[in-house]
């Protein structure tokens, strides 16, 4: 009798409550700041989390709906960038999809794998480093 060939799979490390709380605190305080005291820091915080989670979900068919909601929030954040950088809060039609993206990330974090998030963070770092090297 032939035995089945075992395919090793990486160990899934779930996001702990403490890490989820840290992400949520960053998300919601940055969202509040974006609406009430807009500026570069809250924008960059939200953009960073949106980018990491988007990269983590890039090939995840299981969470494709959530990925679309997060992409919509990121697009609205990009649309509001010039307004936020000038110290004005995003318009209502921009802040609503950003809120949806933040809430989606918050609910999704408990179902993601830490190693996938970490790999996405490292990939984002590399992308930023290569982009900065190209700029004069």
Image: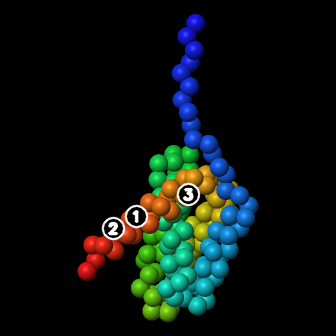
Q: Which residue is located at x 67 percent, y 56 percent?
A: 15
Residue 48: x %, y % from top left: 51, 71
Mark 3 — residue?
A: 117
Query: Disc 3 vs disc 2: Cβ atoms closer than 8 Å?
Result: no
Tag 3, which secondary structure?
helix
Q: Is residue 68 visible?
A: no
State the CA–CA distance, disc 3 to disc 2.
20 Å
Mark 1 — residue?
A: 126
Residue 52: x %, y % from top left: 51, 63
State the CA–CA distance, disc 1 to disc 3.
14 Å
Mark 2 — residue?
A: 130
Q: Residues within 10 Å of mark 3 (few under 14, many from 20)?
A: some
Q: Is residue 36 visible?
A: yes
Query: Disc 1 vs disc 2: Cβ atoms closer than 8 Å?
Result: yes
* Sequence-wise first label, 3 or 2: 3
Tag 2, which secondary structure?
helix
Query: Disc 1 vs disc 3: Cβ atoms closer than 8 Å?
Result: no
* Residue that protrudes farthest toward the right in the picture: 17
The quadrant where residue 66 appears: bottom right
- Please tell me which residue lies in front, 53 or 113: 113
Image side of residue 22 versus residue 116, left or right: right
């Amino acid at each position: 009798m032939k035995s089945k060939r075992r395919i090793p799979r990486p160990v899934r490390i779930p996001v702990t409550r403490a890490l989820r709380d840290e992400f949520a605190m960053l998300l919601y305080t940055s969202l509040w700041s974006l609406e009430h005291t807009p500026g570069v820091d809250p924008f960059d915080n939200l953009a960073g989390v949106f980018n990491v989670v988007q990269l983590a979900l890039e090939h995840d068919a299981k969470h494709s709906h959530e990925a679309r909601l997060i992409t919509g929030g990121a697009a609205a954040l990009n649309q509001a960038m010039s307004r936020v950088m000038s110290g004005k809060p995003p318009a209502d039609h921009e802040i609503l999809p950003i809120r949806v993206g933040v809430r989606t990330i918050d609910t999704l974090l408990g179902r993601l794998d830490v190693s996938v998030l970490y790999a996405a963070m490292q990939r984002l770092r590399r992308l930023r480093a290569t982009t900065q090297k190209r700029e004069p």
